[in-house]
Amino acid sequence: MSQAVLALPVSQPAIDRERLTAFGFALPSFLILSLVFVLPLALLLGVSVIGPEGPTLANYRRLFGTAYYLGVIWNSLRLGLLTTILTLAVSYPAAFALVRARGGVRSLLLATLFLPLAASVIVKAFAWTILLRSDGVVNQALMALGIIEDPIRMIFTETALIVGSVNIFLPFMILPIYAVVAQLDARLSEAAATLGASPLVAFARVIVPLTLPGVIAGVALVFSLSVSAYVVPTLLIGERYPTLATTIAKAYLLAREPGFGAAAGVVLLAIAIFVVALSTQLGREPASR
Amino acid sequence: MITRLAIALSWTAAIGVALFLLAPLLVIAAASFSPTPVFDLPIEGASLRWYTRIGRLDGFWPSLFLSLQIALLSTVISLVCGTLAAIAITRGKLPAAGIFATALVSPLMMPGLVLGIALLQYFRAIGFTMTWSALLVAHLVVTLPYVARTMIAGLARFDFTLVEAARTLGCTYPGGIVRVMVPALAPSFLIAGLFSFLASFDNYPVSIFLADVRTKTLPIRMLQYIEEAPDPTLAALSTLILAGTIVLLFASDRMVGLHRMAGTSD
Amino acid sequence: MSEPGASHLVVRGVSKRFGATTVLDRVDLTIRRGELVTLLGPSGCGKTTLLRAIAGLAQPDHGQVELAGRDITMVPPHRRNVGVVFQSYALFPHLTVAGNVAFGLKVRGRPKAEIEAAVERALSLVKLGHLGKRRISALSGGQQQRVALARAIAVEPDVLLFDEALSALDRKLREEMQVELRRLLQDVRATAIFVTHDQDEALTMSDRVAVMNRGRIEQLAEPRELYARPASLFALNFVGLSTRIGGTVIGSQDGKVEVDTPVGRLSAIGSFQTGASVVVAARPEHLRPGETAGANAVSGRVRSVVFQGSRTLVEVDAGAGESLLAELSGRDAAMPRVDEQIRLAWPIAETFAFAAEARA
C-alpha cells in the first residue's frame, strides 16, 4: 500500500525572506542614523578643517596652541573628572542601600532618582541659582547653624558649578550601578564567608569586581555628559569658567566662527568617543588577577 | 561590626543622595508660592499669583505647543522605527547586528551640543530651512536611541516560544507577532515612549541651534526668561512641569513598575 | 503493521540535517488514531526535531508527513490542527487562564458561546475549572502545565504533541501527572506523541514506545515488549537495568548461540556467525541464587546489596572485570551479604545476544 516516495528536497525560500524582512525593518532607523547623525557629524569634521582658502588646521592650532583655549579644554576635563569622582563616591554606597530597601521604601528612593531625571536641566540649574544666592536657603541655613556669620558668595563660583553638576548627573551614575548590584546573587557573600573570607575581604574580592561593569558604564556616561555640559556652567558660573561647550555655543551663536566652533565640537566629540570606546573595551575583558 | 558600619554608611549615602536630589525641586516648588517677587525663603504666606502669570509670559503658549508637538511626533516615529529595528536586531538574520545596535544607542553618549551645531550646518548645506521640520528631524535622533535601547532589552527577554505556541493554535507568523509579542512588549513600549517624550520635551542643546526667532521650544524660552528677568513665574512654570512629570511617572509606575524602568527584572 | 485505514499519522522517510549533522535519518513512523506513542532517547537523538517536524515548526529536508489522511508536509503550522504542549508551557502572560485556553478558538473565529463552552470543558477536564480568571503569573508550575494542556486540547487537534512537557515538574508531581495525563488522554480518545528522555515516563504513559538513537528509530514496540525483548544493545541500555557480559560466539544453532566469555560459557537467544563479538545480556529479575539445570550460571563475590523497598539489587563481582546484577524481592528466602560467595543462575530463554557496538 505504500507509495513510492519521491525524495524531493523541500525547498527553503524562507531564510532569504527572513533576511529581507530584517533589512526592511532596520532600514528606517538606519536611514535616520546615517542621514541625520553620521553625515552631519562627518560634515562637522569637514567644516573644522576647511578655511577660507582651503584645507587648514588653523582652528585646531588655535584650540591647542593658545594658552587660553588649552585652559578651556582643561576646564571641561576638570569639570568632568570632578563630577565623575564625586558622583561615584556617593553613588556606590547609595546603590547598595537602594538594593537592600524593600517595597515602598525602594519605590520611594527610585522615584527620587527618576523625578530629577525627568525634570529639565534648566529647571534644576535654575533651582540651584535660587538655593545658592546670598539670601538663599543654603546661606540662611549655614547662618542659622552658626557656621558662618555673613552670607558667603556661592553663586558664580566653582563650588556652585560642581555642586550643580553633581546634582544633575547623580542619577546617571546611580542607576547603572544599582542595576548591576541588584543582580548580584545574595549567596555569593555567603560562599565567600564559608571559604574563609572576612566581610571586608569578601567585599573587595567578590562584590567589587562584579560591580565593575555598572561602575564603568556609570563613569563613562557621567564623564561624557559632564564634560560637554552647557546649561549648568552657563547658569551657575558663567564667563568665569569657560568650557568647550560654552565656547562652541559662543562661536556659533555670537561670534559666527563656524569653523572654530566645529573644531571645538570635534574635540568634544573625540573625548566622548574615546570614553565610550574605553568603557566598552574595559567592560568586555574582566580584570584578571 | 564592619558590616554594620558599611550598611550605615550606605544608608547615609542613599538618604543623602535622595535629599540632595530632591532639594532643588522642593526649592522651586516653594519659591513658586512666594507672595513677593523676590525669592524669599522661608516664605511667609503662599500665593498663587505667579501661576496665573504663566500664561502671560512672552511667547509661552506657542513654545509650549511646539515642544509638545515635536515631542509627541518624534516619539511616535521613533517608537515605530526603533521597535522595527530592535526586532531585526534581536530576531532577524541581520548582519553586524551588534554593531548596528551599538550605533543606534550611541547618540545617548554624544554631546547634544555638538550634534546641534552639526545639524545646523548640515541643514543649511543641503538647503533644508524649514525650522519646524528641521526640529522634528533632529529630535528623531534625540529620541531614537532611547527607544532602541529599551526595545532591544525588552525583546532580548522575550520568549519566542510563545509565538510558536500561537502558530500551533492557528495564527500565522505575523498574526502571532501581533497577538502575542506586542502585548508582551507593551511595558517596554511604554517606558521607551516615556523616556523619549521627556528627552525631547526637555531637550536644549540640540534645539537651541535649530530654533529661530519665531520657533522656540519651551526649554529655550525658559532659559531666555531666566537670563533676562528671573522671577517666581518661572518657578511656577517649572513646578507645573514637574507636577506633570510626576503624574506621568506615577502612571508609568502603575502600569509598568519603577523597578522595571531602572532596568532590573522583578 | 497497522491496517491502512487506521493510520492516523504517518511519517515517511523524513530526514533533516543541521549543517554537517544528520539529525533525522530516514525516519518512518505510523501511529493509529487514539494511540499514545513516546519518542524516547538521549539528547541529540532527534526526538524533538521529529516532533517539531510533525508540528510544522521545522521543515524536513526529505520525506513526507501525513495526518488524518492529508499530506501536511508543506502545510504551515497554523493550518495543521496540531496541538503542542511546550516544555516551558509558553503560556501568554498578557492573557488570563481562560484567555489562554480560548486563544486557538478565537483565532479560528468561533462564536462566543461556543468558545465559552469549550473553555469550560477543557478547564474542567484538567481540573482547573475554578481558575479561569487567574493571571498566569499567579499559578504554580503544575497548574501552568494543566493550562497549557487545556489550551492545546480546546481546539480538538488531530494529534497532541508533548515536548518534554513534564520535565519542569518535581518528581512526585511528575509521576502523578503521568498517570493522570494518560487517563485523561484515553478518556477523550486523543492521539498523542510524547517526547522524553525519561524511560519510566515512557513506560508509564505509552501504548508504544519508539526508542531513538542518532536520528533513527531503533525499536518501536509496546513497553512490555521493549523491556523484555530489546532490539539492540542501545535499547537494552536505555530502558531498565541489565547484566551485560561481552564475549565471542563459538557456536550457533536454532536461533541460539553459545558464547565464550571471561566468566564462562553462556547460551543466549540470537543469530550470529561463529567468531562474532557479542554482548550477552539478561534482566536482573531473572537472576536467582542457586543452580538450575540447563540454565546460565555464574559465580562471584557479592559487591553490594542495595535495599530499595519492594526490591533489593544485588551486584556481584564475577571476576575479569565483569559484574552481575540481580533483583531479589522480599519473597526471596535469604538476602545475600556483602563479600559472600554466591552463584547466580538464569534461564537461557531470558538471555539475549546483541552485536557488540563501539561504545558511544
Image: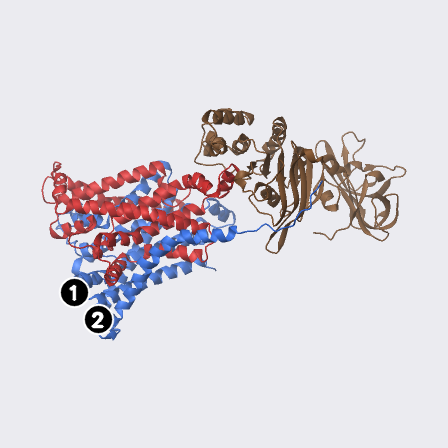
Chain colours: A blue, B red, C brown
Furthest toward the right, the residue is C293
Which residue is at 43% across, 51% downward?
B88
Q: Where is residue C21 in the image (x, y as percent from the top left)?
A: 62, 54
Asked if A227 appears above or below C227 in the picture, the reply is below
Of tags 1 and 2, the one toward the viewer is 1
Q: Is residue A180 left or right of residue A157?
A: right
Secondary structure at numbered mark 1: loop
Tell me if residue B75 can be seen.
yes
Q: Name the residue under label 1.
A: A255
Q: Position of residue C126 (x, y in %)?
A: 55, 27
Left/right of residue A95 with respect to residue A255 in the rendered view: right
Distance from Cα at disc 1 to Cα at disc 2 = 20 Å
The residue shown at (54%, 33%) is C152
Q: In this view, does B100 lie to the left or right of C242?
A: left
Q: How many marks?
A: 2
Q: Which image quadrant for residue C314?
A: top right
| Apparent side of residue C7 relative to residue A98 in the rendered image (left or right) | right
Q: Which amino acid does label 2 sit on?
A: Ala
The chain holding disc 1 is A
Tag 2 or tag 1, which sits nearer the N-term? 2
Q: Which is nearer the eye, B89 or C83?
A: C83
**Chain bearing mark 2:** A
Front residue of this view, candidates A59 and C98:
C98
Q: Quadrant of the N terminus of chain C?
A: top right
Residue B235, image x and y in percent?
A: 16, 44
Q: Is residue B12 visible?
A: no
Identify the residue under disc 2. Answer: A67
Q: Residues within 10 Å of mark 1 (few under 14, many from 20)?
A: few
For label 2, the crowd category at 10 Å Cα-Cα, with few meaning under 14, some 14 to 19 and many 20 or more, is few
| Quadrant of residue B16 within the rendered picture | top left
Question: Which three-letter amino acid code belongs to the residue tagged 1?
Answer: Ala
SS of the residue under disc 2: helix
